[in-house]
């Protein structure tokens, strides 16, 4: 069963993150690397990506002529996707356990950041939608 | 440059899909599959993924002992990720154009859904981010 683990944050969270000390950032990065390696070694790893900063996010709709209409204004409360992991595990419990580890990644002063991680099953194909 | 095109919606928004006729859903999927096929041909396609319904979403945190604490209660306003496309394109404008086409995919009675598509670059391709350490943070493959 494939699950996606999503890390999100408001623009202000991202700004806070940018102010972390080098040491705190290094500890966080070291954790993330070790975490990815562990997922790979255990065979649960499918993919992971980090996204660019919210300041570069655009919201796109199609105009009447089909041309894209872009907008970069978001509400303050908007939760931006910061990054994700896709894992392939035997049970939802296993996915929650792995998400809990990601949540414990070191934050300010090396303390667990305790970030909420959203866990969702991913669909194998359109057939999963019952279409 | 790699971009991710994110399609999101509130729970109420997702519920409206259930009212679509089989014909409307088929027409919608045909357009999305056509776009995917075209992107595969042009070499711009990287990945696409649909997510399960918001009803199955959980928020997980680690307890002090490292055990997971799960919660499935979200505010009504919560925007759930419904699916995404990852594309590798030459310019941001091309990414916006593709997002526009996805936004124009037909909905009920064939009218364009006009869904907003969030377009984001990947951290690995963002030389202007405040810290290179941050950039490296979520890179999957070293």
Image (spheres, coloured by chain):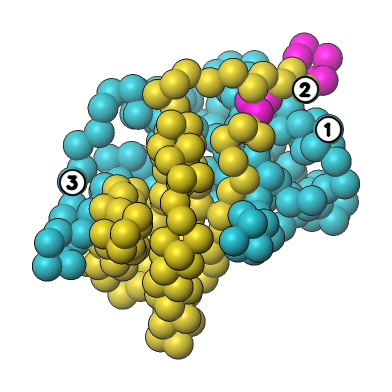
B119, above or below B65, in the image = below
Mark 3 to mark 1 CA distance (whole Å): 39 Å
B24, above or below A109, in the image = below
Label of residue B18 in the image:
none
Query: Magenta part of the protein: which range?
Result: B58-67
Residue at 74%, 18% (x, y): give it: B69
Q: In the rendering, what colour is chain A?
A: cyan
Q: In the rendering, what colour is chain B?
A: yellow
Does the stretch in magenta take in A122? no
Label 2 resides on the chain identified as B
Element under disc 3: strand
Element under disc 2: strand
Residue at 65%, 63% (x, y): give it: A127
Label 3 resides on the chain identified as A
Neighbourhood count class around disc 2 (C-alpha, 10 Å): few under 14, some 14–19, many 20 upward = many
Residue at 56%, 55% (x, y): give it: B50
């Amino acid at each position: 069963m494939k699950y996606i683990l999503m890390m999100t944050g408001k623009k202000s969270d991202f700004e806070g993150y940018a102010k972390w000390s080098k040491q705190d950032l290094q500890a966080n990065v070291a954790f993330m690397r070790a975490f990815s390696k562990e997922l790979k070694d255990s065979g649960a790893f499918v993919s992971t990506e980090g996204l660019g900063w919210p300041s570069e996010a655009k919201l796109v709709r199609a105009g009447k002529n089909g041309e894209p209409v872009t907008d970069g204004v978001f509400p303050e409360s908007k939760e931006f996707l910061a990054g994700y992991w896709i894992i392939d595990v035997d049970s939802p419990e296993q996915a929650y356990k792995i998400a809990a580890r990601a949540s414990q990644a070191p934050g300010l002063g090396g303390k667990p950041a305790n970030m909420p991680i959203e866990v969702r099953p991913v669909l194998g194909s359109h057939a999963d939608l019952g279409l | 440059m790699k971009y991710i095109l994110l399609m999101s919606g509130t729970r109420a928004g997702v519920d409206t899909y259930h009212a679509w006729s089989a014909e409307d859903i088929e027409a919608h999927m045909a357009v999305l599959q056509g776009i995917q096929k075209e992107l595969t041909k042009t070499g711009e396609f990287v990945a696409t993924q649909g997510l399960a319904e918001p009803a199955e979403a959980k928020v997980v945190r680690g307890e002090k002992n490292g055990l997971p604490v799960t919660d499935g209660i979200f505010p009504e306003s919560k925007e759930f990720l419904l699916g995404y496309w990852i594309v590798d394109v030459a310019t941001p404008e091309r990414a916006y154009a593709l997002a526009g086409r996805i936004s124009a995919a037909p909905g009920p009675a064939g009218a364009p859904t006009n869904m907003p598509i969030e377009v984001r670059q990947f951290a690995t391709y963002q030389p202007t981010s405040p810290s290179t350490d941050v950039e490296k943070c979520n890179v999957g493959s070293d």
